[in-house]
Image (cartoon, rainbow, N blue to C red):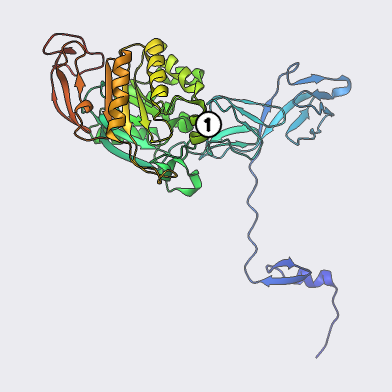
């Protein structure tokens, strides 16, 4: 038998299709055929603006103004960031290829160092490349901000409009409600925490684009589409496209919110909304900071925008024992509502039940809710409700002039309506709202 000596190079070449994985100085030989590396997609090239993004220099070079480095980039070269290139004396932005499953976010600013400045909600997150905002669902990829929940429905249901705490908007109307993952608050009392306090990777979702939502709402004979259950601010782009398409198809729209959206995106959204259910969760800055990880002032600003824009809205205050049930705070809240929003503002005091991180607290005593309502009426508010207390008298609507019941409800079920043309059947007083034509 002839033994022939071969070099290491010849040995490796002789392995042919075998794959070798070097590991800790040794080698693992796999019989799996080496797969051909898939081609890398070309990067999108975007020309930048001379004078604003860069300055031309003699000899074909440019000085980039995108960040503090102020790179001088010669013909064909790239900056320190590896994302800007000089081609023919002009500076170009080299963008990574887009993921077709993502939707670029609205309401943010880009920076030369690839940070994204989110301007959707009060937090104003500054998001470095590869990171996400506080909401968990807006991610910076290559200096652009993307929504990770566009078209990703994690929960949906058919329900009466009263379940969204809307009592003055087409009673008993059918609603197609949907939600995605996550929220921009961290409420310790959240009863939808299974979806609102989870990131998109932690939940199964349905790939339902806006036209599928509208189709299913129509198929189920729903008049409304509602973005609710989690905070719809975090799926703003999805909500906006759904609302636009719904209006084209003759449907009505609403959303339930914590009210922390910035005024500019809010006003754009309201162009396509018929109603808003807003949670004013308390009237103490400490409560908002310690229990919700949020701020009160942006919510009050949102309420003023709703009033100015003339959209129908209703306010819900979930009364939590020992945390936001101080009657002086409730009185201050009611006075603020009357002075800034008007005496005909619709206000709901809802009963708390133990949930999420507050399971050690008891349900709200009915007497507390009744005292809160008594304070609101004493301040001068006309339409004050007690919710999450099935069968309670003040779950129904009463005429502020004659005191007669004009809409009889038991929890979310409408039993009877005594309105004619939007007026009290008994005395003719006009009841604000959007009503069926009887």
Q: In which quarter of the image is the C terminus?
A: top left
Disc 1 element: helix
- Frontmost residue, 62 versus 332: 332
x then y, percent, for residue 347: 32, 22
In the rendered image, which quarter is residue 31 located in?
bottom right
x then y, percent, for residue 285: 51, 26
In the rendered image, which quarter is residue 15 located in?
bottom right
- Seen from this angle, which residue lies furthest left? 426
Say left or right for 286 vs 49: left
- Name the residue rendered at 64%, 57% in the picture: 36
- Frontmost residue, 255 versus 385: 385
The residue that mark 1 highlights is 289
Is residue 252 something that shows in the picture? no
- Name the residue rendered at 41%, 20% in the picture: 333
In the displayed structure, 31 sits above or below 81; it is below
Say left or right for 284 vs 417: right
């Amino acid at each position: 038998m002839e033994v022939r000596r071969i070099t290491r190079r010849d040995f490796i070449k002789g392995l042919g299709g075998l794959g070798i994985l070097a590991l800790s100085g040794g080698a693992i030989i796999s019989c799996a055929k080496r797969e051909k590396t898939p081609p890398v997609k070309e990067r999108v090239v975007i020309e930048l603006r001379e004078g604003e993004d860069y300055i031309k220099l003699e000899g074909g070079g440019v000085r980039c103004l995108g960040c503090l480095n102020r790179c001088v980039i010669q013909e064909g070269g790239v900056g320190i960031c590896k994302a800007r290139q000089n081609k023919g004396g002009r500076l170009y932005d080299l963008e990574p290829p887009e993921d077709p499953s993502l939707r670029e976010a609205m309401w943010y600013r880009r920076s030369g160092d690839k940070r994204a400045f989110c301007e959707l909600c009060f937090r104003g997150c500054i998001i470095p490349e590869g990171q996400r905002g506080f909401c968990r669902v807006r991610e910076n990829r290559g200096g652009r901000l993307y929504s990770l929940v566009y078209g990703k429905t994690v929960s949906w249901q058919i329900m009466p409009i009263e379940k969204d705490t809307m009592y003055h908007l087409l009673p008993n109307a059918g609603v197609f409600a949907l939600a995605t993952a996550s929220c921009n608050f961290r409420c310790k009392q959240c009863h939808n925490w299974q979806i609102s306090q989870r990131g998109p990777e932690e939940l199964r979702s349905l790939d339902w684009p806006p036209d599928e939502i509208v189709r299913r709402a129509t198929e189920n004979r729903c008049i409304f589409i509602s973005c609710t259950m989690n905070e719809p601010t975090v799926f703003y782009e999805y909500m906006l496209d759904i609302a636009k398409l719904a209006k084209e198809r003759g449907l009505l729209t609403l959303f339930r919110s914590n009210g922390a959206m910035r005024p500019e995106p809010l006003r754009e959204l309201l162009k396509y909304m018929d109603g808003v259910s807003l949670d004013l969760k308390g009237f103490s800055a400490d409560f908002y900071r310690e229990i919700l990880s949020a701020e009160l002032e942006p919510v009050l600003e949102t309420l003023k925008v709703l009033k100015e824009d003339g959209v129908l809205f209703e306010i819900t205050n979930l009364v939590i024992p020992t945390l936001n049930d101080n009657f002086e705070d409730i009185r201050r809240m009611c006075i603020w509502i009357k002075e800034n929003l008007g005496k005909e503002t619709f206000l709901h005091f809802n009963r708390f039940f133990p949930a999420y991180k507050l399971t050690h607290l008891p349900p709200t005593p009915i007497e507390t809710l009744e005292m809160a309502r008594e304070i609101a009426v004493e301040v001068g508010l006309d339409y004050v409700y007690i919710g999450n207390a099935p069968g309670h008298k003040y779950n129904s609507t009463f005429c502020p002039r004659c005191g007669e019941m004009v809409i009889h409800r038991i929890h979310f079920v409408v039993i009877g309506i005594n309105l004619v043309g939007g007026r009290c059947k008994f005395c003719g007083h006009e009841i604000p709202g959007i009503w069926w034509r009887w």
